[in-house]
Image: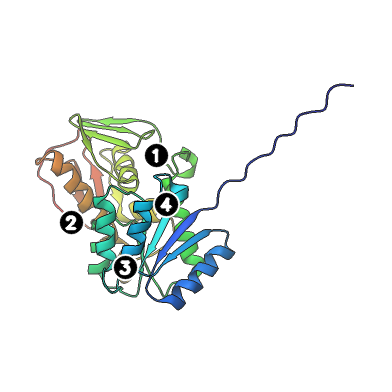
Amino acid sequence: MGAPAEIRAVEAPAPVHVLIVDDDSLLRESLEQNLIDAGFRVTGFSNGPDVLAHFASTTPDRAGRGDLILLDWKMPEMNGIEVLKQLRDRKLDVPVVFLTVLSDQIYEEAALLGGAVDFVEKSRSFAILRRRIELILDRQDPSETRSGGAPGGAVEVGPLELDPGTSRALWRGERVDLTLTEFKIVHHLAERAGTDIRYREIYDLVHGEGFIAGAGDDGYRSNVRTFIKRIRQKFRDVDADFAAIETYTGFGYRWASRGGQDKPGDG
């Protein structure tokens, strides 16, 4: 009779750590409980300075600092957009979702241009918010496979080089500092260079199918325009003549098949 098989314990993955920053204690506590019941680890903060202090005092690993932040906009002492700016100034790339009663497009655009990954109204149900969190964290996971919607292989189109393994983008040999979401959009456009890509297709790539943001049935268009505007600016910071993202007015965008340098429209 052979030796008994060795039994090894399989360590369960750590729960996703969500940080909630909101001065409304009742809403914060209710949301905390819903997230805990759904299997998340949660830490709550009543103001911006406290969450910034948390990041200053924790180790760089995400298990300690948090995997995602749900951030209120209107808070005393320091509002949400100021908190976001300080996080990005400190090179902290933890995904930030604004959870707010401010539904005007101007706030959504400011949040996305500031580096947030999503903007969700507080009136949305918890089921929708949970789905948003899951989709965001799925696309932040470097272990994603192509079948799961993550970028496929390396891409080279004209002066553009993309490496999905490191989410690194180079333009004329210089690094373009894209977020993971921005990299995913650029990869999708460049992989299909010369093909017109609909607003809705880009929106679904970022947010998941079936979710609508912004005002009206076509609110997703302004959301996509904001992402493209931010991406274009990052490339222009490297090359003032960048014009590879072309606008197909009323339809969407395309990546120029040769990394074109014609002057773009910003629609």
Task: Name the front one of labels 1 and 4.
Answer: 4
Task: Name the front one of labels 3 and 4.
Answer: 4
Q: Which residue is mark 4?
A: 65
Q: Amino acid at mark 4?
A: Arg
Q: Which residue is mark 1?
A: 151
What x and y, as percent, mark residue 241?
A: 9, 40
Badge 3: how crowded within 10 Å, few (<14), some, or many (20+)? many
Q: Is residue 72 left or right of residue 238?
A: right
Task: Name the front one of labels 2 and 4.
Answer: 4
Q: Which residue is mark 2?
A: 267
Badge 4: how crowded within 10 Å, few (<14), some, or many (20+)? many
Secondary structure of the residue carrying numbered label 1:
loop
Mark 2 or mark 3: whose residue is earlier in sequence? 3
Task: Name the front one of labels 2 and 1.
Answer: 1
Secondary structure of the residue carrying numbered label 3:
loop
Q: Please give the name of the residue rendered at 38% of the width and 65% of the height, measured from the top-left corner.
A: 212
Whether pointer 3 and pointer 1 mark residues with C-beta atoms closer than 8 Å, the reply is no
Mark-to-mark CA distance, 3 and 4: 30 Å
Mark-to-mark CA distance, 1 and 4: 27 Å
Q: Amino acid at mark 1?
A: Pro
Residue 250's label in the rendered image is none
Mark 2 or mark 1: whose residue is earlier in sequence? 1
Q: Please give the name of the residue rendered at 45% of the width and 54% of the height, measured from the top-left corner.
A: 135
Secondary structure of the residue carrying numbered label 2:
loop
Mark-to-mark CA distance, 2 and 1: 25 Å
Mark 1 or mark 4: whose residue is earlier in sequence? 4
Say which quadrant the N terminus sits in: top right
Q: Which residue is mark 3?
A: 214
Badge 1: how crowded within 10 Å, few (<14), some, or many (20+)? many
Whether pointer 1 and pointer 4 mark residues with C-beta atoms closer than 8 Å, the reply is no
